[in-house]
Amino acid sequence: MQAKSKDELNKLSENDSNIKKTKKKDEKITKKSSDTTTKSNKSQKAESNLSSTKETKTKVARAIKKNVVNKKFSTNIEEYYDLPYSYNETMVKILAQTPTTLFIYWDISEDDKKNFISKYGENFFKETKPVLIVTNKTKNYTFEVEINDFANSWYLHLNDADCDYFVELGRRPIVQKTNIDNYIFVSASNQIEMPNNHILFDKLGSSVFFKNIKNNSSEKKDILSLSFIKSLGQVYDIYEFYKEIYKDEINIEDLSQINLSSSSSSNFM
């Protein structure tokens, strides 16, 4: 085997060094490319996760909004309903709230409003005021109540109970010197009999029946023997009344401890 010269050995050493440098460069390039690829994959993965998170949040937000809307809608349907202010019908209705309190409600249809304006002019409702004409048919008298156009119902106190009433809705001119009639009829109500406001002992017979709620039995009691029945119209202590009626059924000493719903005295008319 021939020995290589010094120059040849130097060349071989340089070639080896160049090969190693090239390999290192290739490794660096490969590593850099790998890092870039990894970063790119991580970035894509992060973007994908972010997109997925945004989509999930959007879905959750939509679901919450939908549930809230459904809940509100359900609540509105089940718990709240706004009654209309007007049913577009010309009418007057009366109801008895108490023996001496009348509840009145009314309405005028749009067609009738147009007819009044056509007959009396554009300013008819500005130049007139609404009134209620209340008639007591039993005692044959009438009185008038001035109302306003902002209301469609009214509570009216009456002096007389146990009477038949009916009501008219009409309009009167605010200023008398106009071409509008003094009174313009609009509508009339139903007729109602107001209930009585006192106890009718004068219509009782000689006896009444009392029911015992403990044993569900009924017992006839003679009331003419009670002293207060003989002089009706006077004021009596309600406790004395209970003592007379239930003297054989309750302990009189315990009666004073009972909280009766009536007042301490009653006026029998």
Image (cartoon, rainbow, N blue to C red):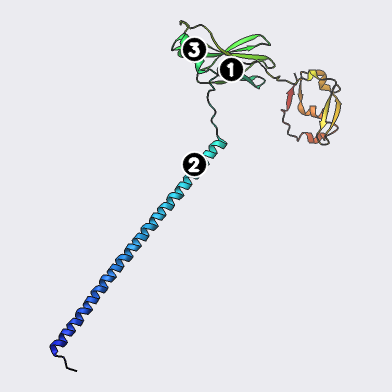
Q: Residue at x 14, y 89 (%)?
A: 6
Residue 19 in percent (x, y) is at 21, 79
The x, y position of residue 98, in whole percent, is 66, 22
- How many neighbours does mark 2 have within 10 angstroms: few (below 14), some (14-19), or many (20 or more)? few
Query: Of the residues shown, which amino acid type is indicated by label 3?
Result: Asn
Whether 171 is drawn above or below 85: the answer is above
Pick the residue in front: 139 or 122. Answer: 122
Q: In the displayed image of the protein, which residue is found farthest to the left?
A: 7
Q: Residue at x 15, y 87 (%)?
A: 8
The CA span between labels 3 and 1 is 18 Å
For disc 3, the marked residue is 115
Q: Is residue 210 left or right of residue 46?
A: right
Q: How many marks?
A: 3
In this figure, which residue is indicated by the disc labeled 1?
Answer: 92
Q: Amino acid at mark 2?
A: Val
Task: Reply above or below: 152 against 142.
Answer: below
Front in this rendered view, residue 204 or 76: 76
Q: Earlier in the sequence, mark 3 or mark 1?
A: 1
How far apart are the alpha carbons under marks 2 and 1? Answer: 40 Å
Which amino acid lies under the numbered mark 1 shown in the image of this protein? Val
Give the SS element for disc 3. helix
In the rendered structure, the answer to whether residue 143 lies left or right of residue 211 reads left
Mark positioned earlier in the residue sequence (2 or 1): 2
> Answer yes or no: do the residues labelled 2 and 1 have beta carbons within 8 Å?
no
For the residues labelled 2 and 3, the Cα–Cα distance comes to: 45 Å
x, y (%) of residue 120? 47, 9
To which quarter of the image does residue 233 belong?
top right
Q: Residue 32's x, y, as percent?
A: 27, 69
